[in-house]
Amino acid sequence: MLENRRILLIIGGGIAAYKTLDLVRRLRQRGAQVRAILTRAGAEFVTPLSVSSLTGDKVYQDLFDLTEEAEIGHIQLSRDADLLVVAPATADLLAKMAAGLAGDLATTVLMATDKPVMIAPAMNVRMWQHPATRRNVATLLNDGVFCVGPNDGDMACGEYGPGRMAEPLEIVDAIVKHFSDGRITPFPETDEQRSTEKSHPLANPRPLTNQRVLITAGPTHEPIDPVRYIANRSSGKQGFAMARAVAELGAETILVTGPVALADPPGIETIRVETAQEMLHACQSQLPVDVAICVAAVGDWRSRQKAPEKIKKTAGLPPTMSLTENPDILRELSERKNNRPKLVIGFAAETQDVVDQAKKKLKRKGCDWMIANDVSPETGIIGGEENAVHFIVGNIVGNTARYDVENWPRMTKDHVARKLARRIVEHMTSGTITSAPFGRKRGGMNG
Ligand SMILES: Cc1cc2nc3c(=O)[nH]c(=O)nc-3n(C[C@H](O)[C@H](O)[C@H](O)COP(=O)(O)O)c2cc1C
């Protein structure tokens, strides 16, 4: 899976360094060659002997130890890798990377490298939420650094929240995905490879720079009274993955999310709302945008009246509830006369006749692309980590509606997001019209 991939691991001084030992083992099991740099603080948490026993190589620790001719120099160390992984990425390392400091071996190598860099941050919740760390992570993401984690969870310091390093298998998964998506490729060896890679839009690691992308995610909660609400089972995972995927490609990303148990993705402007009406207003306030991706499972209906006090249970007399329709955000964005995004993408969650229903929805809403998925309970998709989607593009040929449908195999929600992000890049950079949306009487996508 990772045969002959050369990974240079930089181990910072955090408690999570012990997990990095397991990471080395997992990477080597999958065929990767792993070299490790241990920071001075990192060596307080794991010993050079443990690290070198697991990598099967010497551990690199001191910049000025690498000056002997027989030794590999710091430039060589960074050049001899396909990917640099910083795990745990301490608050201190993130700050130094963002500032471009090069005061020791780890940071000098990070400054000298021309290879992709992935960080797995790990720190106390308050350190992670500190404005300085937020700024540093945003800077790094903007520089093209890939970020995996951190997760929410119990911390060694006794607190709970975001800041826990991603698990070794999650980091392995992110590395495998990066290589298999072709977004992190080994440095091209030949001129031919170089020119092929450069000519492809995705050869630019930040192809969505200058594009503003709006994403909606999660469910909505429609209040019945001060304590009860109508909701659905959406977890927000697909929408959050979508936001990360376009942000990684350089887009200015705005995520409008309903109530979910997910932390704000680093470096992404996240607006939290509760109801469909609030979500609509939040989306409208962010226009103009270049691309809108409506992943949220917006409640179709809300209670006509929100009771000012908790509705009391009266024996034998259950209350009746009158519903009214919620605004249709996807349709609103698709049919706008002013500030219509150049590309509007909808997600259709269905439980029967998935593709047919999604085609009808595409036509009804007037969006450009529809991503349909089967959310029947037995699929485990709603709330799960994986998705199996149908990618549908609508065209009007003469007077007839035609649909191009691609059935994507089941994959992780991150993978779906990255695949869709690549389609967006291809679409936005090709300058060609790939769909004629139903809701507009215009020439095409970019018209
Ligand atoms: C017991 C202990 C645990 C620590 N855990 C973390 C941590 O999880 N994350 C972090 O950013 N810093 C942590 N620190 C602080 C770093 O070790 C310190 O900022 C150090 O300078 C980091 O150096 P480095 O980034 O060069 O590895 C910890 C310090 C101590 C004493």
Image (tube, grey):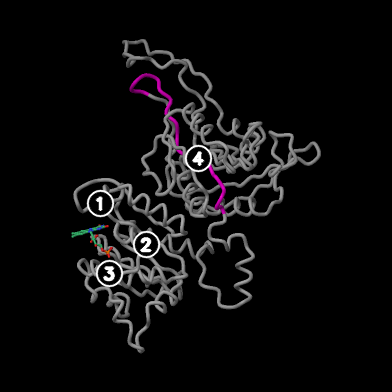
Could you tell me which secondary element the residue under label 1 belongs to?
A: loop
Which residue is label 1 attached to?
124
**Farthest residue in the right direction?**
398
Which residue is label 4 attached to?
375
Question: How far apart are the alpha carbons under marks 1 and 2?
Answer: 19 Å
Name the residue type under label 4. Answer: Val
Name the residue type under label 3. Answer: Thr
Question: How far apart are the alpha carbons under marks 2 and 3?
Answer: 14 Å
Q: Is residue 133 left or right of residue 438?
A: left
On whether ligand 1 comes within 8 Å of the CB at mark 1, the answer is yes
Q: Is residue 103 left or right of residue 140?
A: left
Front tag of 1 and 2? 2
Q: Residue at x 51, y 30 (%)?
A: 280
On whether ligand 1 comes within 8 Å of the CB at mark 3, the answer is yes
Which residue is label 2 attached to?
97
Residue 224, located in which quarter of the rendered image? top left
Question: How far apart are the alpha carbons under marks 1 and 4?
Answer: 36 Å
Please name whichever residue, 29 or 175, is drawn nearer the observer in this view of the structure: 175
Question: Is 222 in the magenta?
Answer: yes
Q: Residue at x 28, y 68 (%)?
A: 21
Contact between marks 4 and 2 (CB within 8 A): the answer is: no
Question: How far apart are the alpha carbons under marks 3 and 1?
Answer: 19 Å
On whether ligand 1 comes within 8 Å of the CB at mark 2, the answer is no
Contact between marks 1 and 2 (CB within 8 A): the answer is: no
How far from the left and from the top, in percent, is residue 110? 39, 68
Could you tell me which secondary element the residue under label 2 belongs to?
A: helix
Which residue is label 3 attached to?
39
Front tag of 3 and 4? 3
How far from the left and from the top, in percent, is residue 305? 44, 15
Please name whichever residue, 166 or 74, is drawn nearer the observer in this view of the structure: 74
